[in-house]
Amino acid sequence: MKKNIILALFFIISFDVFSQESESPNIILMIGDGMGLTQITSGMYSNNNKTALEDFQYIGLSKTHSYDNLVTDSAAAGTAMSSGKKTQNYVLGLDHMGNPLKSILSICQDKGYSTALIATSNILHATPAAFFANIDYRYNYEPIADQMTKSGINYFVGGGEQYFNSRKDKRNIINEMTENGYEFVYNISDYEKNKSNYIGFFTAKGEPYYSYKGVNYSYREDEPVEDFKGRESYLARSTEATLKKLKELSKPFFIMIEGSQIDWGGHDNDQEYMVSQFLEFNETIKVVLEFAKKDKNTVVVVTADHETGGAAIVRGDLSSSTIKNRFATPNHTASMVPVFSFGPNAHLFKGIYENTEIFNKLLSIVEK
Ligand SMILES: [Zn+2]
């Protein structure tokens, strides 16, 4: 009898130790492309003076310059955050000498994590691609798609279908990936219903255009607004579905979620476009925070790769939630960008540091 009690105690204690050690935290990295303080503030004042970012525990600032340019592009900034090295603009997953780098996503996979990528651009665009690609030119989408087939990412959501199945080399990578266990879906309800451990959800053949308050917009001049069908706002809903899927895999997970088109609104110097994309991202942050608060073992980091447009708020009215932006440039700027963090080890992200430190801080959490 006594022996049984001791044995039972042993199991309880060892199970407890085991469960603590095995519970590596989930990591949710959210990147608002081109989301500087003015983009956040403009969205906040347009939204009854509120943003989900007010719920975060720690705030830092990240220096965004690339290896060869004070003003970074999304490829170099994505590489800095995903892989910890400053590199040249346009380069993905290589250091400035051209050596391949291992991304935090890939390191997490080695540690048994499930992984996912979600973007409102094509899924091979610079920011998501920085987490799996190693290539010297970000716009080489077909080789980047090829690299994606070898990435082992469980779930991905974004545009870019044409780089998988309408290729110059005539390969149909969708068929190849299907043979290797992936399933592909083309709308959100099929994505939610699908139970596969490996799913690609294509939201557009090329770039997913955007739709805001029932009105369709195009950022391309060669595509008249009345002729094209704007994308449904899918970021928050597909994020919710993906978190559910990842949770059901019963392993720790890493996910990167990008609000890609905040940047495109900035390039267009189009206040309404930019703010609409921030607000979609803001809704997604709410979904993520709700998950993290319940889960208690999820670290959430929200940041940007750079600011776009040199945006300023020059006037507005709080009572009607209206603002007026002016822009200094159609390009990116070199301003520091904020970093918001929540969850276990969130304190690591306070202070002022290089964007490469985002990688180092995430790595230290994964390696704890
Ligand atoms: Zn840009």
Image: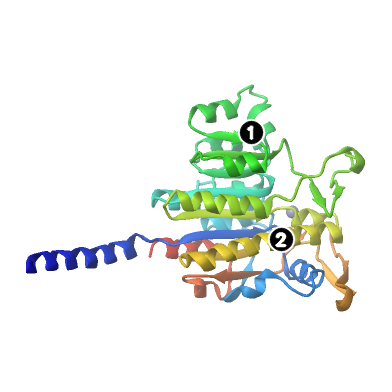
Near mark 2 (Cα within 10 A), the count class, few <14, some 14-19 or many ≥20, is some
Taking the image as four quarters, which one is ligand 1 found in? bottom right
SS of the residue at dot 2?
loop
Residue 103 in view here:
no
On the image, the x and y values in percent for residue 109 come to 43, 49
Q: Identify the amino acid type marked 1.
A: Glu
Query: Helix or strand or loop: what does disc 1 sit on?
Result: helix
The quadrant holding residue 224 is top right
Q: Nearer the viewer, mark 1 or mark 2?
A: 1
Residue, disc 1: 142
Give me the disc on residue 71. Answer: 2
Is residue 350 in view? yes
Task: Residue at 66%, 49% (x, y): give it.
Answer: 119
The amino acid type, in three-letter code, at marker 2 is Val
Q: Is residue 189 above or below residue 330?
A: above
Determine the residue positioned at 61% across, 41% down: 191
Q: Does 62 sit left or right of 362 as displayed?
A: right
Name the residue rendered at 48%, 32% in the picture: 181
Quadrant housing the C terminus: bottom left
Disc 2 residue: CB within 8 Å of ligand 1 = no
